[in-house]
Image (cartoon, rainbow, N blue to C red):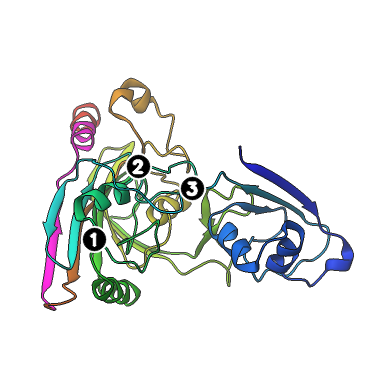
Amino acid sequence: MAERYSFSVEAEHRGERLDRFLADRLAVTRSAVERLLEEGAVALSLGQAVKNYRLRGGEEIWVEIADPVPAEAQPEEIPLHIVYEDEDVIVINKPQGMVVHPAAGNPSGTLVNALLYHCGGSLSGVGGVLRPGIVHRIDKDTSGLLVVAKNDFAHHALAEQLKTHAVSRLYHAIAIGNLREDRGTVHKPIGRHPVDRKRMSIAKAGEGREAITHYEVAERFGAFTYLKCQLETGRTHQIRVHMASLGHPLLGDPVYGGDGTRFQALHNAHFAGQFLHAAVLRLIHPRTEREMCFTAPLPQNFDTVLALLRKEYC
């Protein structure tokens, strides 16, 4: 069972850093508190729960510490859709519903468990024992391409490409509503939701992390829009949060307001999460320095829903 704590901040703690305050009360290190903050396990009634937040006095703080996960991810024989593989990298077309790495609530059945079985010891150790090889992630209910590093050399090179935006990622999505413009850019910072720590949200100026999404309309259905979204940055839930901020959440996304449409009620058998697919991945091979481009076709449920939309709204 998860452990839950709540604290009221007295005036005498005004100006104290949040991480120090929690480390004292939970009797843990500040690095342990930082991990809790990164995992969204801390909620704050005022302001944003980040480690350097200065308490004002009067806040309520809630902490939920989940059950511990295994010390190391274990190999599991799980089928993988491998798009490309060599001694340095492996590119996977991840199915919707698969979690990328073990965490509280998902200790097994993840992409990492499958990779450990397939690759054995040939995964980079930069990400730690629970995230070997993982350079970037896609959400559980997002399908499509991601690259995994099979050694530390490749991991560092790919991480630098992500940092400098040398890796290009194109997503296909279905949004609710009819977007006004044929193309546009959302440039809004993203941070943890101030109350629901399992969600992300648009952050206030000077807070959160810079996030940029370029989008282009591929097809219109009146009540829905088929989009292609190019990531310039790669924040958690970025496309989902950005499209919701425009008033057009992704179809089938229960977290950001894209659930419960009449269309979904009629065709619910084809829904298992948001309609978001990482379709194109471009990168520079870390060893050969050759540009590589990978593509993944739309999953069957995505194709089916597009066909239904064309039939019903065109």
Label 2 element class:
loop
Where on the picture, by quarter, is residue 123? bottom left
Magenta segment: 289-306
Looking at the rendered structure, the kind of residue marked 1 is Val
Q: Earlier in the sequence, mark 1 or mark 3?
A: 3
Q: Which residue is mark 2?
A: 141
Whether residue 144 appears in this view of the structure is: no
C-beta proximity under 8 Å, tags 1 and 3: no
Q: Residues within 10 Å of mark 3 (few under 14, many from 20)?
A: some
- The mark closer to the camera, 2 or 3, is 3
The disc at residue 69 is 3
Task: From the image, state whether disc 2 or disc 1 is nearer to you.
Answer: 1
Label ID, residue 299: none
- Nearer-N-terminus badge (2/3): 3
Magenta stretch: includes residue 92: no
Instruction: Say which residue appears at 49% left-offset and 46% top-offset.
Output: 104
